[in-house]
Image (tube, helix red, strand yellow):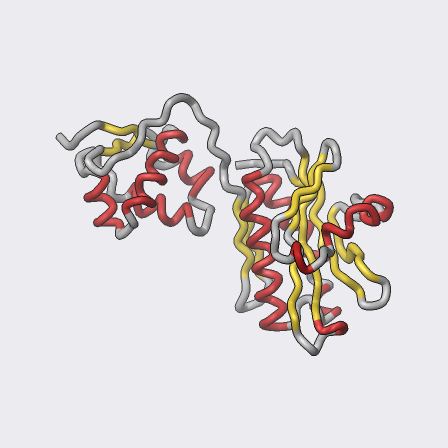
Amino acid sequence: MASGGIECIFFSEFHPITGPKITYQDPPDYISKETFDVINVYIIAKPQLDQRLIKLNLGETVVMSLPYSIQNKKYSRNELRFNLGLLLSTKHPGGLNSYEPVIKKLATYMVTLELESQFLSDESKKEELSRLLPCIRRELNMKGNCVISIDDANTIFLSIRPVLKLKGLIEEVLFHHVPIMVNRVNFFKENISNDMVFGKVVDRIIKQIDGQGPVKFIADEAQIEDCVICTCLEHLQNYEITMISPEAK
């Protein structure tokens, strides 16, 4: 699923001497110093906004980011404050909510890499971001997902989850209903399967759909909670991957 909505991706941090700064961004210099001076209080934010998703409307673009700080006495001022964010077009037809999981995953990856190998606090290792950011932006814009190896132990998996676009009334899924496949492969592979959590759950569900077994039976066979399978099947109806028969034949 091509996206094209990411106009810029950036890594910002708090420097102990010069204060908030954008260390890396792609395209280079896309966010001007003047713009950053205005918005940096929300990028390298106060503790009250730590680990909170922030959206800043800049007219035709929105900055979406998640400020983060790691507390440790080994850092200057006893903390490492950073933010890896996106500048998104408000005119993107897919909507902006689909990028929220990407932002949260990026923050989680950065924290993990720092705790494991000082990826952000070691200047030589941090330079790898100058390669990673263009790759992430290019792959997400072209394909809607990316898989990028950092080292032997860490790989970045990102996927822009499709936003539901209601095509009409979606029938509520109940346990006695029987789901029937309409489009088994193509749409699922192109739009859902790359999501590391949602895609795996849906994959387990569709493998059990044979047009005869009711929802409760499929949930038991796929080992998925009842409430989860009903929600997933309603999503699949919306994507026209499945339809619902009122009862088993």
Q: Residue at x 70, y 41 (%)?
A: 56
Determine whether 134 is above or below 248 in the image. Answer: below
Q: Residue at x 74, y 69 (%)?
A: 124
Determine whether 169 is above or below 224 in the image. Answer: above
Q: Quadrant of residue 227?
A: top left
Total numbered labels: 0
Q: Is residue 179 left or right of residue 238?
A: left
Residue found at the very far bottom of the displayed protein: 74
Q: Is residue 56 left or right of residue 210?
A: right
Q: Quadrant of residue 235?
A: top left
Q: Position of residue 211 (x, y in %)?
A: 21, 33
Q: In the rendered image, which quarter contains the C terminus?
A: top left
Viewer-proximal residue among 153 and 14: 14
Viewer-proximal residue among 73 and 189: 73
Q: Is residue 187 left or right of residue 173?
A: right
Residue found at the very far left of the displayed protein: 249
Q: Position of residue 20 (x, y in %)?
A: 80, 58
Residue found at the very far front of the displayed protein: 48
Q: Position of residue 117 (x, y in %)?
A: 62, 72
